[in-house]
Amino acid sequence: GAIQRYQTDKEHRFIQTSAAPSVEDPATPWRFNAEIQATSGTTAGTSSVQNPTLTLPTATITPFPYDTSNIGWSLKQDFANKPALDAAFSNGSYTFTMPTVTAPATTFNATLGLTGDAYPNTPSLTNTSWSGGNLMINSTQSFNFTWNSFTGALPGAFINVDINGLPTQQLAATATSYTLPANSLPPGQMISFKLIFANATSVDTTSVPGVTGLAGYGADDRLTIQTLQPN
């Protein structure tokens, strides 16, 4: 198939710089996100999906820009407050129109419902090894990330642990820890980390055969890991 995944979500964004609970991002606390990951191609011209669009609940048709950093089609916009987010991207039905060029070429249309304002509670790491605003870890040893419980999880909710340079780890909504194996990260580096609580409000497994489309609401805790230099 030409499509690997597609999704849309609204995010409430937080940052953490110490053992104290995470705080709302003062710069960009709210985000709308929609993305399509094609199965092949590294540019807009070579992607197995060509010129996709997103139809908003207002019936406005918005073209997807191509994101070369993530090798996919991505529509993202940050907002200073929730009313501004909802004014630009209201709750309702979002329709993905995805023309493909992989034989047999076809156009897939998939509608996902983004409704209910089902934002999760605020995620926050409970680890205590902080210094200078960064979480300090010895990358030559395993490290156990721990966090608060995901409360109010809907059916299908999940938790993502996203460490830059490593595959995203998707965990059950009941998880409160993740152990990073020893030597997974290089020493002496600053590495971005994100913990995401996600509530899915719409799951589509039929519009694109073999592909799952998701819509929902997320809350994420973003921070920086600093790996120690070897002695």
Image (spheres, helix red, strand yellow):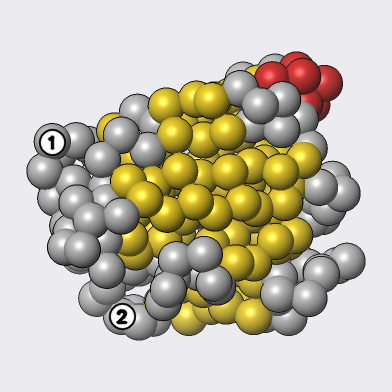
Q: Which residue is mark 1?
A: 45
**Residue 203 or 198: which is nearer the viewer?**
203
Front tag of 2 and 1: 1
**What is the CA distance from the residue labelled 2 to the residue labelled 1?**
40 Å
Q: Residue at x 11, y 43 (%)?
A: 46
Tag 2: amino acid: Ala
- Residue 52 image position (x, y, % from top left): 37, 38
Q: Which residue is mark 2?
A: 182
Q: Is residue 197 above or below residue 72?
A: below
- Asked whether the residues under the numbered discs 2 and 1 touch, taking CB atoms below 8 Å apart as contact, a structural biologist would say no
- Residue 217 image position (x, y, % from top left): 71, 50
- Residue 134 image position (x, y, % from top left): 48, 46
Q: Residue at x 44, y 34 (%)?
A: 53
Q: Is residue 107 above or below residue 26?
A: below
Locate residue 111 relative to residue 178 in the image: left or right: right
Q: Quadrant of the C terminus?
A: bottom left
Q: Residue 142 falls in which quadrant of the image?
A: bottom left
Q: Residue 230 falls in which quadrant of the image?
A: bottom left
Report helix, strand or loop for mark 2.
loop
**Residue 153 or 4: which is nearer the viewer?**
4
Q: Earlier in the sequence, mark 2 or mark 1?
A: 1
Q: Residue at x 30, y 55 (%)?
A: 106
Crowd band around label 1 with a 10 angstrom C-alpha radius: few (<14), some (14–19), many (20+) = few
- Residue 5 image position (x, y, % from top left): 41, 61
Locate residue 186 relative to residue 166 in the image: left or right: left
**Residue 102 or 70: which is nearer the viewer?**
102
In the rendered image, is residue 143 in sight? Answer: no
Q: Residue at x 77, y 40 (%)?
A: 92
Tag 1: amino acid: Gly
